[in-house]
Image: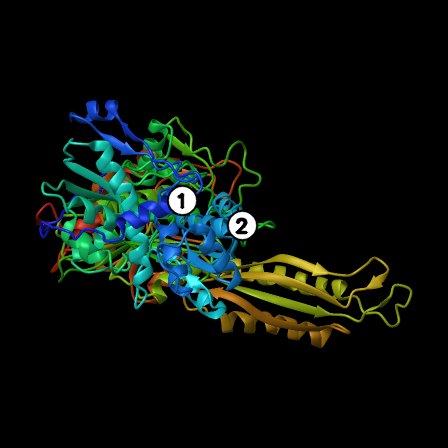
Amino acid sequence: MRSQRRPVLLNENVQSLLAEPNPSAELAVQFHKQLPGFSRTPLISLDDVAKDLGVKSVFIKDESTRLGLPSFKILGASWGSFKAIARELDLPLSTDIETLKKAAISHSVSLHAATDGNHGRAVAHMGAILSIPVEIWVPANMHPSTIELIRSEGAEVVVSAGSYDTAVLEAQKSAERKGGILIQDFAFGDYQEIPRWIVDGYTTMMLEIDEQMGDERIDLVIVPVGVGSFAQAMVSNFKGKKAPPAVLTVEPDTAACFYKSLRKGEIVVEHSSHTIMAGLDCGTVSSIAWPILRGGVDAAVTVSDYEAHQASVYLENQVVLLGTEGARDYVVPLNVDTDDPVALTQTLVQIDSVNPTLVPVPGTGETAIARYIKAWLEHRDIESHWIEPVQGRPSVIGVVRGKGGGRSLMFNGHIDTVTLSGYDGDPLSGRIEDGKVYGRGAADMKGGVAAALVALASVQGLGLSGDVIFAGVADEEAKSMGTEHVLQAGWHADAAIVAEPTNQEIVYAHKGFVWLEVDIFGVAAHGSLPDIGVDAIVKAGYFLVELDKYAARLKDKEPNSPAGPPSVHASIIRGGEEVSSYPALCSVSIERRTVAGETPEAVEYEVRSILATLKDNVKNFDFNVRTTFSRPPFSISKDDPFVLATVNAVGNSLGETPVLRGEGFWADSALLSAEGIATLIWGPRGEGLHAKEEYVYSESVICVADTLSTIARGYSISGGYHHDGFMMVLAILDP
């Protein structure tokens, strides 16, 4: 099942641009010819591509060996650097390279830039030619091999804590502090002149193309965007001809700053996310490029990393038409093209997303899976948002906006998993066998996440009244910071479904929990001094006996909750230093599962009362107790309209009245419910949660995806719950 991908965007306001000739074009060409290794790059005919497309010919300008570097960027970076240094030192543009080099060294000139790839390497290469220091800032997610290539040119590389846009600002501040020159192809604020010179440097390539094409007419030019400087040069050149070709821009799905700006009619600042098209991972169009691109580009399109990878494999070189770059190391991307919930589950399982707080060696975290989900959303032109107040623990929002007046519905699902250790076989295989998808997280809960994503995409373009929101959240397997971050960021809804694996039964209540730390104190002493020493571990034994009695009393309570009675257990015991000493401290971590009406304060009082009684009756017994963490229980009335609507929709899908039940586990539903969101838990069938083998039933994932889509269509309509044009008649039976 293929996706409804982001469509080609036609520019209805495209103009016939007749650009002024570049007055320094010949100077730039003469300058480039002085650089070591200069030669004209080839224009290659792609005959097979032309045949497949049914056109006369397709040519690619192969810039993978330009001036000894794998990118055209050296043309702009070198000319921009040359003019900036010449201006700084009051030298004419006719100055030769050797004279410029001597002057730059004697005046301690330094160059600074930010990059997502080859621009920074090109600036560093220019610094190496001139034997002057260069400092390059790179975004946090840059591949290590790319960083090493920049360092190989002799530059100092500084890794930013943020994105490419953040790195640009950091490079600017660093240049100002150190009295250096910022060589950036991105124009912003008052920084305009050097980016124009960089654009002028690309003219050398334009003149080469004109010579190589001769009298052949060009009908279509395909050009990448990034910050837009190269595209600006291409539009200015080709739209300046008497019979100008059409211009099509290409960007990554996840960094479509020009596409979205063109659609809105003004510059949009995009929160880009990782792409293997490294030089194009940019969130803002250059301010000097924007007016030229807005008026001169005929159409814009975006592509996925997977499509770019397929093209690079096909061409045996990573190239982009009229903006080519050489091959570079990258992690092979996963396909974002499918809307089949089972295939999507399989892909999500193949992404390691172990919660880093649950394993001795920190797990990979949610970054990789969050990037994939954001790319999946962007490929379909679904509005997406990246939420990461804690570094390395991102959550992702996807939104299909309603036209207004209807209820909003959220699908919530956690994207982290427990450890891969102890899993039998390959925990990341995602293999499909006997109608099941296997792997860590298949059931808990990547099957539910996949179903929710497919359901979200299915309502796109239907013109629903209310918003439908997907929240892929971090950290549910630990402290649920992801859902907290989503709520704190202002993402709320009228109702929510948490697609945890419930065997397609509806969970409308679950327990909460309180974590307490109990310290039992002794007196440290040598093991040969029993009159002085007090054994904290032995004293803790009295408490453990009473804790067992407390657990029995809770178990025997008449349950006043569909989730069952409360419970308590000891989880971790720590004590002692060495065998020959009396231990001064024994700490017992306990978990108390709570039900509706119980508070952390009341639970701590109960435990403290047990300890206080022991202190009164056991010699030398002393203690401290504190609550370290808690989460509330959850429940919703079975008569709530959202419950009734969901029961009806699920019943129609299953062909029978679904079971409603309470559960002993805890889920993010409690956090959503606490914010006034009508919440239920409902998801696919699966087995082996946190166990040595885990799987989810494929047919149940499909059922959940279809049913969530039905619920979304019905719930978003203002004025009632509808299904197939008729008002729902709802009934509910206790299981």
- Going 70% across and 77% down the picture, which residue do you hit? 616
- Can you tell which quarter of the image residue 341 is in? top left
Q: Are marks 2 and 1 in contact (CB under 8 Å)?
A: no
Q: Is residue 128 above or below residue 433?
A: below
Under circle 1, the secondary element is helix
Under circle 2, the secondary element is loop
- Going 42% across and 34% down the picture, which residue do you hit? 430
Compute the Cα span from label 2 to label 1: 21 Å
- Can you tell which quarter of the image residue 176 is in? bottom left
Q: Is residue 665 above or below residue 624?
A: above
Amino acid type, label 2:
Gly
Colour mode of the rendering: rainbow
Residue 170 position in % (x across, y down): 43, 64
Residue 705 seen anywhere in this rendered image of the structure: no
Crowd around label 2: few <14 · some 14–19 · many ≥20 (10 Å): some
Q: Earlier in the sequence, mark 2 or mark 1?
A: 1
Q: Quadrant of the N terminus?
A: top left
Residue 693 position in % (x across, y down): 50, 35
Label 1 sits on residue: 34
Residue 369 position in % (x across, y down): 41, 46
- Going 53% across and 31% down the picture, which residue do you hit? 425
> For residue 154, which numbered disc appears in the image?
2
**Depth order, front residue of 254/508:** 254
**Which residue lies most toward the bottom here?**
616
Residue 16 position in % (x across, y down): 9, 49
